[in-house]
Amino acid sequence: MKVAELWRYPVKSMAGEMLADATLGLTGIAGDRLVHVEGAGGRVLTARTHPRLLGLRATLGSDGEPQINALRWDSPDVSEAVHRAAGKTARLVRNEPGDVFDVLPLSILTDGAIASLGVDRRRLRPNILIAGAEGLAERGWPGRQLRMGTAIIGVRKLRGRCVMTTYDPDTQAQNLDVLNRIVSDFGGRMALDCWVIAPGSIAIGDEVTLL
């Protein structure tokens, strides 16, 4: 098995960026989810209720600060774009390290599993896509460890999926059949919730070993 894709999401619930290589720390991929969208009363806003956020693309600038549609995250133009996507009270807030992950800081998906589901893998927002896994092999990995590059990753459990999977990553058009099939055919779970046991570096093409 090999590392096929690496994804970083500098702003929670926005489209991310594909990487050639990445550094893994105890809070996941360096630069992942540095900023989140906050609404009235300090409530975290996500694409579950504001799917237009998925139409904003977040990357990491050369200065280490998130950019949204190529503009620095704290610029007035970005604020206006966030208002259009999530309402007038929405604003971007920097996170404390590791404090906005829904469960664990890494999501891993295999090519075999996404082929079985038959949708664009971006709907599941993985950090790491592994190629060369047969069918639904990933469903037997919870409790195991993965070595890739110089890092070792622990697999905790299959990830429960939500309404975010129903939104097309390019158009944000909704198709509820996607989540209905995940529920009916896969018990509502697809991809893996993982954490970093031994930090290190990983790159596209690195061998993945199931320990």
Image (spheres, helix red, strand yellow):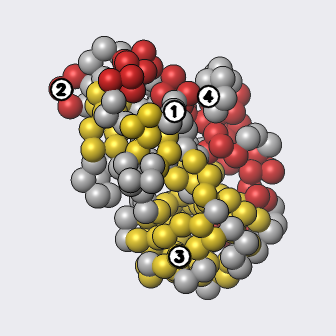
Q: Earlier in the sequence, mark 4 or mark 1?
A: 1
**Is residue 154 among what the camera can see?**
no
Q: Nearer the viewer, mark 1 or mark 3?
A: 1
Residue at left offset 27%, top offset 44%? 94
Residue at left offset 20%, top offset 31%? 42
Q: Nearer the viewer, residue 56 or 71?
A: 71
Q: Earlier in the sequence, mark 2 or mark 3?
A: 2
Identify the residue position indicated by label 2 in the image.
41
Looking at the image, residue 70 sits to the left or right of residue 38; the answer is right
Q: Secondary structure at mark 1?
A: loop
Q: Nearer the viewer, mark 3 or mark 4?
A: 3
Q: Earlier in the sequence, mark 3 or mark 4?
A: 4
Dot 2 alpha-carbon crowd within 10 angstroms: few under 14, some 14 to 19, many 20 or more = few
The CA distance from mark 1 to mark 3 is 27 Å
Q: Nearer the viewer, residue 181 or 107?
A: 107
Residue at left offset 37%, top offset 64%? 27
Q: Secondary structure at mark 2?
A: helix
Identify the residue position indicated by label 4 in the image.
167
The CA distance from mark 1 to mark 2 is 27 Å
The CA distance from mark 2 to mark 4 is 26 Å
Q: Earlier in the sequence, mark 1 or mark 3?
A: 1
Q: Amino acid at mark 2?
A: Gly
Looking at the image, residue 23 sits to the left or right of residue 210; the answer is left
Q: Quadrant of the N terminus?
A: bottom right
Q: Amino acid at mark 1?
A: Asn
Q: Nearer the viewer, mark 2 or mark 3?
A: 3
Identify the residue position indicated by label 1 in the image.
69
Task: Where is residue 186? Give x, y as percent.
Answer: 68, 48
